[in-house]
Amino acid sequence: MTGRLDGRVAVVTGAGSVGPGWGNGRATAVRFAEEGATVFAVDLDPAALDETVRRSGEHSGSIVPVQCDVTDSAAVEAVVRRCMAEAGRLDVLVNNVGGSRAGGPVEMSEDEWSAQLEFNLTTTFLLCKHVLPHMKSAGSGAIVNTSSTSGLRWTGAAQSAYSAAKAGIVAFTRSIAVQHAPFGIRANTVVPGQLHTPMVETRLAGQRAGGDVAALLEQRLARIPLGFMGDGRDTANAALFLASDDARFVTATEIIVDGGMSARCD
């Protein structure tokens, strides 16, 4: 199937990537463009956005790179205003900004705790706050928020603030889905598991395996019943389904993209 988002306008946050390869946001921006959407690709790092545009190949003209700090409400509002001014509509929102810090409540400082909640949860709130009025006015819209299997269960490392924030995204999304269903707006959550995204090399290996990327990949792979690790493109395909009319009767729920990991008992 092609053209599942023909004529739609999407805002995708975290659409760059922390390193080479397919992060969730980059893959989602490119996948949406391939399916016919005009994508306002939002990230703090303009160089990362340039790489996203480059990787979109023949669809690069459908991606509008937008530099923004999504922890800043005024900056987020400005992005939404720009989208409405230039495209005249906003059909799909994908919230994908996030990242973990190691530690439980004893090890983490209070500032680290607060920063993790702001980065992983409040950013989702801010985008929804400024986008929902436009979707409500239009009488339609699809929101896809990105959580993590760390918000569902222990996944091998203490990261209590990240886990709390990602669990919060699930509850937040269900709440806004039910509240806004009468206005034709759907809201769902993609829950990625331990994918091989650029985050592994740039951050997680240092946090959890002394910088040994191969060791961390081996640890993560051992948890996955399917026996291989997906990447950001798997998250993107789930987001595409939820954003498209194929999911017209799907709201207030989650798609877990983890190769069966979260269903294991060990």
Image (cartoon, rainbow, N blue to C red):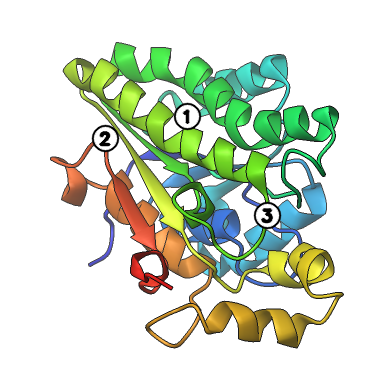
In the rendered image, the quadrant that contains the C terminus is: bottom left
Q: What residue type is labelled 2?
A: Ala
The numbered disc on residue 87 is 1
* Residue at the front extreme, as displayed: 106
* Residue at 70% from the left image edge and 58% from the top image edge: 17
Percent x, y for residue 189? 38, 43
CA neighbours of label 2 inside 10 A, class few (<14), some (14 to 19), many (20+): some
Of residues 222 and 251, the one nearer the viewer is: 222
* Residue at 55% from the left image edge and 62% from the top image edge: 155
Q: Which amino acid does label 1 sit on?
A: Ala
Q: How far apart are marks 2 and 3 (CA)?
A: 28 Å
Residue where numbered disc 2 is placed: 252
Q: In this view, does 39 lie above or below 136?
A: below
Going from the N terminus, do you reach mark 3 or mark 1 first? 1
SS label for mark 3: loop
Q: In this view, does 109 lie above or below 65?
A: above
Q: Distance between the residues labelled 3 and 1?
A: 43 Å
Q: What residue type is labelled 3?
A: Ala
Of residues 221 and 139, the one nearer the viewer is: 221
The numbered disc on residue 33 is none
Going from the N terminus, do you reach mark 2 or mark 3 first? 3
Q: How far apart are marks 1 and 2 (CA)?
A: 27 Å
CA neighbours of label 1 inside 10 A, class few (<14), some (14 to 19), many (20+): some
Of residues 122 and 72, the one nearer the viewer is: 122
Residue where numbered disc 3 is placed: 158
Q: Is residue 210 above or below residue 158?
A: below
Residue 160 found in image quarter: top right
Q: Is residue 182 above or below residue 55?
A: above
**Are the residues at dot 3 and dot 1 in contact (C-beta closer than 8 Å)?**
no
